[in-house]
Amino acid sequence: MTSKERFLKALRREVPDRLPVTTHHLMPSFLKNCLNGIGEQQFFDLFGLDPIRWVVTSRANSLKGEFYDPLHTALGFLEARRICSGDWQIRIEDVPGRTDDTKRFCIVTPARTLSMVLRSNEHTTWVEEHLIKEKSDIEIIAKYVTFPGCDTDEVNRIAAEFGQRGLIRGHILCFDGFGQPGCWQDFACLYGIENLIYSTFDDPGWVHAFLEVLKERKKHFIRSLKGAKYDILELGGGDASTTVISPDIFEEFVMPYDSELIAEAHEAGQRIVYHTCGGMMPILEAIASMKPDAMETFTPPGMGGDARLSEAKSRIGDKVCLIGGFDQFHFFNGCSPSQTRQEVRRCFSEAGGNGGYILSASDHFFQAEPELIRAYAEEASSCNYPYHS
C-alpha cells in the first residue's frame, strides 16, 4: 500500500498491510537543532515514516467587506492568513525590555481595542496576558469578529501535488493570534483555563454564551470545507483533558459544542480526529459518542497522561481509530534502540489488533536522537497484518 492508502484504511478501522507509523507536529526547533534544519517532508523520507502534510488555509469573504490582513506576511506555526474587516483590524506591537520575543497582539474594533501579550522562545509561544479581561469583551468579539472560510482551491492544489505520499491534515479554525481548534480550548486560550473553570461555577450562562459565539464561527469555517480534499482535520485540545477539567465540565461545556461541529464536518464530507493531550480514560466513551473518526493522543502515564492502550482499544476500538500512545519522552531520548523497539511492539500489541490504529508520538517533541527515531520507524514497519488481538 501507499502511505495514504495505509492511513485511510486505519481511519476506516480496517486492516492495512502494516502498522501506519508517523508523528504529530514536527517542531521547527527540533528540525533545526537535531537535524540540521531539514524540511518536514525530508524528515519523513529520511526515517521512512508515513508522511503527513499539514495544510492550513483561509479565505476572506469580500462580499462582507473582509480582507486578508495586509501586515500578516510571515505566518507562524500552522497559522492561516488572518482575515480582517473595517471593524476588526490587527495591530502587533513589540514589548520592549524582555529577554524573550514578546508581542502585544491588538484587535482594533469600533468599540475598543482588545489585546493579549504573547511570549515566544525558539521552541514555542505562550500567553502572558489573556485577551478577555472583562465579561463585556465577549460582546465586542461577537459583534465584530470576522468569519474566515477555507481556501479549498489551495488545499486541493497541495493535495494533488502530494498525491499518494501520505495524509493531508488540517485543523478547525482557531481564534486570531492564539487559539485551539475546539470551542472550549479556544475560550481557555483567550481567558485562561483557571478563570474559565471558575466561571463554569460562578457564571455558567456567560460561559455558554461565548462558547456559542466560538461554535458559530467554527461552524461557518466547517461549512466552507465542502470539496476540500483533506483526509482529516483536528478538533479539541488539551484543556478538555481530565488532567485539566472534570468529566462533568466536559459533558456540560465541551461536548454540546464540539459534537455539533463534528456533525457539521461529516455533513461537509470531512473526517475529524479529536485531540486530547492529557487524561482521557474517564471520558473515552463520552468522546467516542461525539462520533469523531479518530481520537488522539493517548498520552501514557510516563508523560503525564493516563492512557492504557489495551483498555482503550477494548472500550472504544470498534467506534474510532486510535492514534498515538507512544512515549516519545522516554523512548526518543536516553534509551537503547532495542528499548524503543519494545515500546513500539507494546503499542502494536495493545492497540493494533484488527486494524484501526496509527502509531504516533503522543504529541510534540523538541529533542530526539535520530538513531531512536530510526528504530521506531523500522520496528513499526515490521509490524505486519494480519494480526488479531
Image (spheres, grey):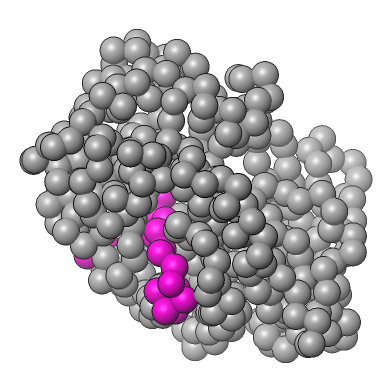
Residue 192 higher or lower than 330, as above or below: below
Quick one: 246 or 289, which is closer to the camera? 289
Quarter containing the N terminus:
top left
- At 41% from the left and 45% from the top, the residue drawn is 4
The residue located at (65%, 31%) in the rendering is 39
243 sits to left or right of 106: left
Q: Looking at the picture, how far across and down is residue 96, in whole percent?
A: 91, 45
Q: Quadrant of residue 108?
A: bottom right
Q: Is residue 342 left or right of residue 74?
A: left
Image-based side of 36 in relation to 324, left or right = right
Choose between 223 and 229: the one closer to the eye: 229
| Residue 357 shown in magenta | no
Query: Which residue ends up furthest to the left in the rendered image?
Result: 389
Q: Is residue 103 above or below residue 334?
A: below
Specify whether residue 277 is painted magenta.
yes
Residue 179 in view in this figure: no
* Residue 69 placement (x, y as % from top left): 84, 66
Relative horizontal placement of residue 93, taking residue 362 as reference (left or right): right
Quarter of the figure that contains the C terminus: top left
Residue 94 x/y as whole percent:
89, 50
Closer to the camera in the image, 144 or 49: 49
Image x and y of residue 168, in percent? 51, 51
Taking the image as drawn, is residue 108 in sight? yes
Q: Which residues are magenta?
A: 264-285
Residue at left offset 46%, top offset 44%: 164
Residue at 40% across, 74% down: 266
| Quarter of the view holding residue 316 | bottom left
Residue 212 vs 159, above or below: the answer is: below
Instruction: Say how many tags the image has.
Output: 0
